[in-house]
Amino acid sequence: MKKTGIMTDSHSAILNEEAERLGIKVLPMPFYIEEKVYREGVDLSREEFYDMLRKGTDVSTSQTSLVDVAELW
């Protein structure tokens, strides 16, 4: 019998503690703040992210790289 795994991205709003308890792998989604790349929940907290949005900082999102997806698999 083959094993089945569950993987989602950080936009799913599954908390890290919950993901670990359930055996779910969470891929951090990248976003750019003033042309510097950050990974959601890794390089910047949600509070810091929302604070930058309130200040009008230039923020954009991107999809994850295939390399990051393959590494998590």
Image: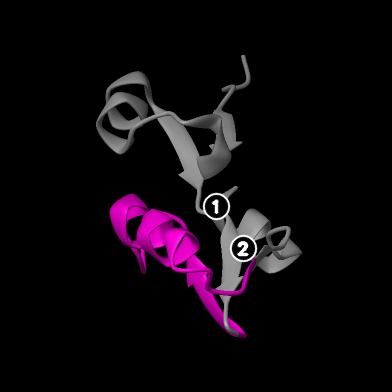
Residue 31 lies, in percent from the top left, at: 59, 65
* Mark 2 secondary-structure assignment: helix
Residue that appears at 66% across and 57% down: 70
The answer to which image quadrant residue 63 occupies is: bottom right
Using the image as rendered, state which of residue 65 and residue 61 is in the foreground.
Answer: 61
Instruction: List the residue tagged with mark 2.
Output: 68
Number of marks present in the image shown: 2
Query: Disc 2 marks which amino acid?
Result: Asp
Q: How many neighbours does mark 1 have within 10 angstroms: few (below 14), some (14-19), or many (20 or more)?
A: few
Q: Nearer the viewer, residue 10 or 31?
A: 31
| Residue positioned 34% across, 32% down in the render | 15
Q: Which residue is mark 1?
A: 72
Q: Residue at x 32, y 62 (%)?
A: 48
CB within 8 Å, label 2 to label 1? yes
Q: Amino acid at mark 1?
A: Leu
Which element type, helix, strand or loop, lies under badge 1?
A: helix
Q: Quadrant of residue 30?
A: bottom right
Q: Is residue 59 above or below residue 17?
A: below
